Image: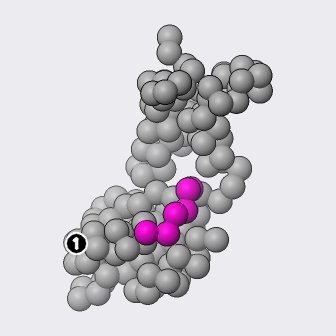
Amino acid sequence: MEINDNVIPASNSVMANVLYDLGTLVDNRIYKQKAIIMANNVKPDMEKYASGYANYAALMLKEIVPFYEVAIVGKDAHAKALELNKKYVPNKLFLGSVKASEMELLQEKFVQGTTMIYVCENKACQLPTTNIMKAQKLMK
């Protein structure tokens, strides 16, 4: 089983990160727990050879430092996401839509005629903004 990150990240470390992010997007705690279990299983080896477990370390950071869920809703969602991504913030996950959506992070956030940005942590969102710089400041 491939667990060490080398020149190419290990498939299992990539899968653990994808599972965690998917758990965040679809509000499935079991997915997130499985991802953390995967990271915890390699923790003893990680302490001996940290550079071989970079993806697992990045996953663990999502549990330790603020992890932002950024919901961008409105006709300019894609353009706003590109603009927001110009400033590097490592622990963020974008979710966007140009129309109303039933996805948990997007529910009841669509406002006709404007593009709103919601910066959230653990599904708790700050007041929405239309301003890129203000949204960036919310992701300290």
Residue 51 located left or right of residue 24: right
Residue 23, given in percent of the width and then of the height, sits at 47, 44
Viewer-side residue, 102 vs 121: 121
Viewer-side residue, 136 vs 99: 136
Residue 12, given in percent of the width and then of the height, sits at 48, 24
Q: Which residue is drawn at 37% across and 74% down?
A: 83
User: Can see residue 31?
Assistant: no
54 to 52, vertically: above or below: below
- Residue located beneath label 1 in the image: 99
Figure label count: 1
Q: Residue at x 61, y 49 (%)?
A: 62
Viewer-side residue, 44 vs 38: 44
Q: Quadrant of residue 38?
A: top right
Residues in magenta, as a range:
86-91
Residue 64, given in percent of the width and then of the height, sits at 71, 50
Q: Magenta stretch containing residue 90, yes or no?
A: yes
The quadrant of the image that shows the C terminus is bottom right
Residue 22 located left or right of residue 139: left
Q: Quadrant of residue 114?
A: bottom left
Q: Which amino acid type is marked by label 1?
A: Lys
Mark 1 closeness class: few <14, some 14–19, many ≥20 residues within 10 Å:
some
Please tell me whether mark 1 sits on a helix, a strand or a loop: loop
Q: Residue furthest front?
A: 7
Residue 93, given in percent of the width and then of the height, sits at 46, 57
Name the main secondary structure of what is drawn in magenta.
Answer: loop
User: Can see residue 44?
Assistant: yes
